[in-house]
Image (cartoon, rainbow, N blue to C red):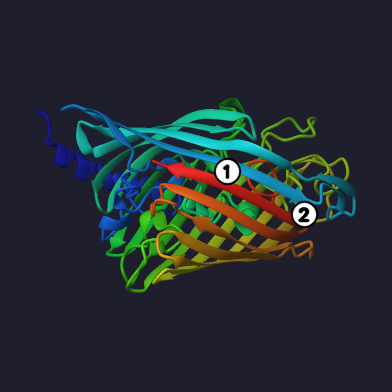
Amino acid sequence: MMLPVKVVVRALLPVVILCFLGNGASAQLEQSTLFRDTTVRGDSIFPTYPNTTSGEFTPGKGFSLVKTKIATLNLSIYAMVRYLNQMPGKQTWQDHLGRDREFTGRNDFHWHRAMLWFSGQLFTPKLTYVATVWSVMTTQQTLVYGNIQYRFNKNFTLAAGIMPNISVRSMQGPFPFYLSTDRTMGEESLRAGFTNGITLKGEIVPRLNYALFLGNNLSTLGVQAAKLTRTLSKGVGLTWMPTTGEYGPRGGLIDFENHKEVSTRFGMSYTHDRDNRFNNTGQPSPDNTQVRMTDGVLFFETGALADGVTVQEANYDMIAFDLGVKYKGFNAQAEIYNRVLSKFDTDGPVPINRIQDVGYSLQLSHMVVPKILNVYVIHSYFFDEFKRHPWELGGGVNVYPFKSRSWRLNGQLHHVYKSSAGGTFGLYTAGQTGTTVTIGTDILL
């Protein structure tokens, strides 16, 4: 005799929860359990805003393509074009071991990033899916990824697929509603990445959300399944929005919606992983390019801690606390980071076996002209293991020509000292001390 669906669900749910907790699984903080976003039509007519899994995985309003009794299909688009000029053009800098390295500043235009979200529901509104075509021209990467979610109720949503290792605020939903066209140096330096995994999330009590995450590693980019170890990344996150119970669409970092009451958001996230370089120690360049030290050097590259020595594995522990306030066009965002790399497995002697880096970032913005003109300032600083104290200070403007978040023009100028972030994806190159100008425009439909 077939058991009723409700009976089966009630019987299995405690088992699922115990499996997560029993394995020390943790979670990524997010802002919610639904896919829908209020972009375009919702900018001015919705009094509250649905939360999201993570901006990179959550479509905008989009366009409805198919709707049948069995399933729906929606298409949503994000695209960004950017000019980036890192000055000076040439520079010699020293890493934490005093070795000379060369910096070549970028000066280029790029159709930087494009995302196509195909999303919908299957059989029931509780079962949703999203498949994303993701392309970044500056790194010459194109991927197709996604996830599937089943929402039992507001307290429990189970999801599997590609998701973020929640480690910093910018991984908790706001993309692409950053102040700039990308993350700050503070966020980019220490954060974990995106990987295949499973998450359990929901509401504990009204206005307090949780998320538990279990994933393959810190970042799936460039890492083949055959190279993965049996160690899984684990994360836990909490989000508390005590005053209004929301923080605007995607929890964005601009008070575009012009809150009439003070809106507050408190967050905490923790991620742990026994991370691996995912490449033979005979190869100087690791497949794992997610973890950098605060001098901008890849942690798993040969010679990172001592000449000729390679780190094969190490513990990654990251905890972050964030606070945000919105009121009448003002937005203040602060975050504190504490990352520890420890228990190094190396093929030779190294001078240290533990690295602790503490830092913070501040982001302030104001809608000078409601729904049209926003101005902002950013600042990041590190109290790092190597006492290099990387920092940045800058600011910029955002213009919304049609009074909608769906199209934005951005310009930013910032100065960086001994950049701890690197790579061609974001706004930073490792080791830079100088000024960066960026001008971009993006759309979200």
Residue type pointed to by label 1:
Leu
Task: Locate residue 320 relative to residue 47 in the image: left or right.
Answer: right
Residue drawn where x is 47% and y is 53% of the image: 177
Q: Which residue is mark 2?
A: 295
Disc count in the image?
A: 2
Q: Nearer the viewer, residue 132 or 182?
A: 182
87 and 309: which is toward the camera: 87
Q: Amino acid at mark 2?
A: Asp
Residue 429 position within the rendered picture, expressed as x and y whole percent measured from the top left = 73, 47
Q: Nearer the viewer, residue 92 or 100?
A: 92
- The quadrant of the image that shows the C terminus is top left
Residue 266 falls in image quadrant:
bottom left
Q: Which residue shows up at 66% across the image and 34% down it?
A: 278
Q: Secondary structure at mark 1?
A: loop
Image-based side of 243 in relation to 310, left or right: left
262 relative to 272, above or below: below
